[in-house]
Amino acid sequence: QVQLVESGGGFVQPGGSLRLSCAASRSIFSINYMGWYRQAPGKERELVATITSGGSTNYADSVKGRFTISRDNSKNTVYLQMNSLKPEDTAVYYCKAVLLPRVYWGQGTQVAVSS
């Protein structure tokens, strides 16, 4: 069982930055992979970035070069650094953990980008 708690969302102007955190209730050392997904109003939930237990990362094309995913095993936390934010980044951001064979989701944190 893994509980995930996201934080760090908020309101920011275009071009600004935010750092999201996803704190897990247990050690993330052995979690197969963790990731960030987002869902905008009226749209499907989509992948933003993932990171494996070995540290390999993967990003959606729309965020490459602007977002960085990282993990701190000592704090059981995964981060998403978001720079150069755009209005189209507005969404609820969810943390996901895959500990085979189960998948766990956090409750989400709202990010709003607007002038």
Image (tube, helix red, strand yellow):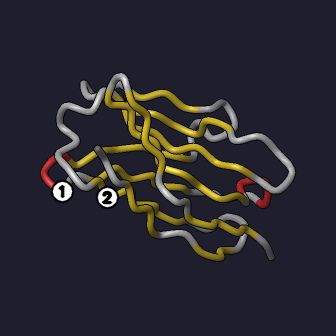
Q: Amino acid at mark 2?
A: Ala
List x then y, in percent, for residue 53.
Answer: 26, 28
Q: In the image shown, does 23 or 57 lie closer to the viewer? A: 23
Mark 1 closeness class: few <14, some 14–19, many ≥20 residues within 10 Å: few
Is 101 left, or right, of 45 in this rendering?
left
Q: Amino acid at mark 1?
A: Lys
**Residue at 31 percent of width and 47 percent of height:** 2
Quadrant of the frame with the N terminus? top left
List x then y, in percent, for residue 17.
Answer: 55, 65
Mark 2 closeness class: few <14, some 14–19, many ≥20 residues within 10 Å: many
Residue 110, picture quadrant: bottom right
Q: In the image shown, does 74 or 85 lie closer to the viewer? A: 74
List x then y, in percent, for residue 82.
Answer: 53, 55
> Is the residue 87 above or below the residue 48 in the image?
below
Is 14 left, or right, of 94 in this rendering?
right
**Residue at 65 percent of width and 74 percent of height:** 12
Residue lying at the far right of the rendered structure: 42
Q: Which residue is mark 1?
A: 75
The image's mark for residue 27 is none
Is 8 left, or right, of 66 in this rendering?
left
For the residues bearing labels 2 and 1, Cβ distance under 8 angstroms: yes
Residue 115, picture quadrant: bottom right
Secondary structure under tag 2 reads strand
Secondary structure under tag 1 reads helix
The image's mark for residue 23 is 2
Residue lying at the far left of the rendered structure: 74
Answer with mark 2 or mark 1, whichever residue precedes in sequence.
2
**Residue at 41 percent of width and 29 percent of height:** 57
Q: In the image shown, does 112 or 12 lie closer to the viewer? A: 112
